[in-house]
Image: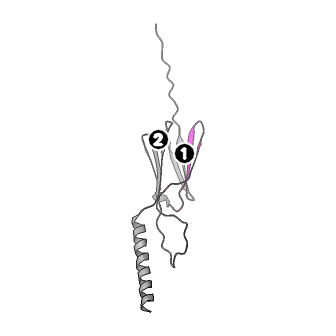
Amino acid sequence: MTNAVLNRETETVERQNATEAQKEKTRILTPRVDVYSDEEQIHLFADLPGVEEKDVQVQIEKDQLTVSGKTAEQTRSGELRYSEFRTGEYKRTFTLAESIEEDRITAVYKNGVLHLTLPKRKPLTKKIEVRS
């Protein structure tokens, strides 16, 4: 009887330690992305399941576009038997090959999908006067 009680207590402590270690490690998840382009703009769709709108971030620095978001661990009653749901930080960085008008970028987050519209910068055409 004593061994059974000790084993149960040991298992509980081991589970608690594993849970604490898991909380200390933050998973970096790569969101799945679709990118479409036409002559005027680039559309980027990123799946960020479980991320709240307030936790979604989009940054652009030089030619680097970074999309990130964070999910929180949800506490549920009962003993976890099986899990496929991932929590952690989503992060993905893209190198922009084309010039983008940064001031006109729009971001819409709905139903766990981030839709970015990146307007392409039109090339400046300047006529050079030729003199003799």
Q: Residue at x 51, y 47 (%)?
A: 106
How far across and down, in percent of the image, does residue 70 sit? Answer: 46, 60
How far across and down, in percent of the image, does residue 12 sit? Answer: 43, 80
Circle 2: residue type: Glu
Q: Label 2 belongs to which residue? A: 102
How far across and down, in percent of the image, does residue 120 sit? Answer: 53, 37
Asked if residue 39 is among those painted magenta in the image, a careful observer would answer: yes
Q: Residue at x 40, y 79 (%)?
A: 13
Q: Residue furthest front?
A: 3
Secondary structure beneath disc 2?
Answer: helix
Q: Nearer the viewer, residue 130 or 63?
A: 63
Asked if residue 47 is among those painted magenta in the image, a careful observer would answer: yes
| Residue range highlighted in magenta | 28-50
Up the image or down, 122 lies above or below 18; here it is above
How far across and down, in percent of the image, does residue 14 sit? Answer: 42, 76
Up the image or down, 116 lies above or below 78; here it is above
Q: Label 1 belongs to which residue? A: 117
